Amino acid sequence: MSHPLVLALFGNPAAAAAAARALHECGVARDDISVLSRSHDEEGALAEQMDASPGVEIEDSRAAARLGELSGQVLAAIAVVLPGIGPIVAAGPLSAGLGEAAGHVAGGLASALKAAGIPAGRADQIQQQIEQGAVLLAVHASPVGLDAIRAALESARPRELDVVNWDK
């Protein structure tokens, strides 16, 4: 079912958190707010702090998760044969971290934004800003509540605000 998706890009987590509070005050539910940042771990922590959802559905993260898992397994298999450090890398957090990082990038936030109707160049700019530390809030809206959501987001002074038609 198609509905508006409001995207607000904030320069830092504190501004995004202020926007999330404003959204909750105007009645937006936790499940209607997605937080996107430079890593899944950061998204999870921010989402918990903001009483929102990590941005998995926006990023189409099933593919990202699969690629991340596969990347981690391949890295672990290669690392096992490296003399000295192979077993440490294969069993440690480095393997998981590198696999997750590959999956996050391959999940293609820019691809998901393009599919949602953001022009390609603009989607790439948003992804680059997120990679540099910006935080994106994506808010599912009903056409009736669109003005209240925009006002709540604008109260926290986002760098940019876009409204697209979400068809997923």
Image: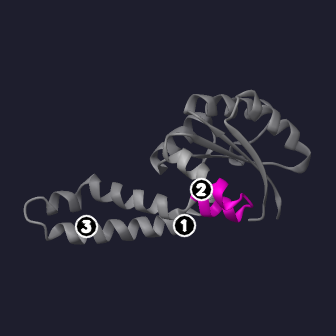
Q: Describe the element under mark 2 as helix, strand or loop.
A: helix
Of circles 2 and 3, which is in front?
2
Are there few (<14), some (14-19), or many (20+) residues within 10 Å of tag 3?
many
User: Separation of disc 2 and disc 3 at Cα?
Assistant: 31 Å
Residue 70: image x %, image y %?
38, 71
Q: Which residue is mark 3?
A: 76
Q: Residue at x 61, y 64 (%)?
A: 111
Q: Is 5 positioned to the left or the right of 61 in the image? A: right
Q: Is residue 120 magenta?
A: yes
Of circles 2 and 1, which is in front?
2
Q: Amino acid at mark 2?
A: Asp
Q: Is residue 98 above or below residue 13?
A: below
Label tally: 3
Label whose residue precedes the other's in the sequence (3 or 1):
1
Q: Amino acid at mark 3?
A: Ala
Q: Which residue is mark 2?
A: 124
Q: Amino acid at mark 1?
A: Arg
Q: Which residue is mark 1?
A: 62
Asked if residue 37 shows in the view, the reply is no
Q: Is residue 126 above or below residue 156?
A: below
Q: Please report the bounds of the magenta region as a residue range.
A: 109-123
Please tell me which residue lies in front, 105 or 74.
105
Q: Residue at x 89, y 50 (%)?
A: 143
Q: Residue furthest right?
A: 144
Asked if residue 134 shows in the view, the reply is yes
Q: Quadrant of the N terminus?
A: bottom right
User: Residue 81 lies in what quarter of the image?
Assistant: bottom left
* Colour convention of the picture: one colour
Main SS of the magenta part reads helix
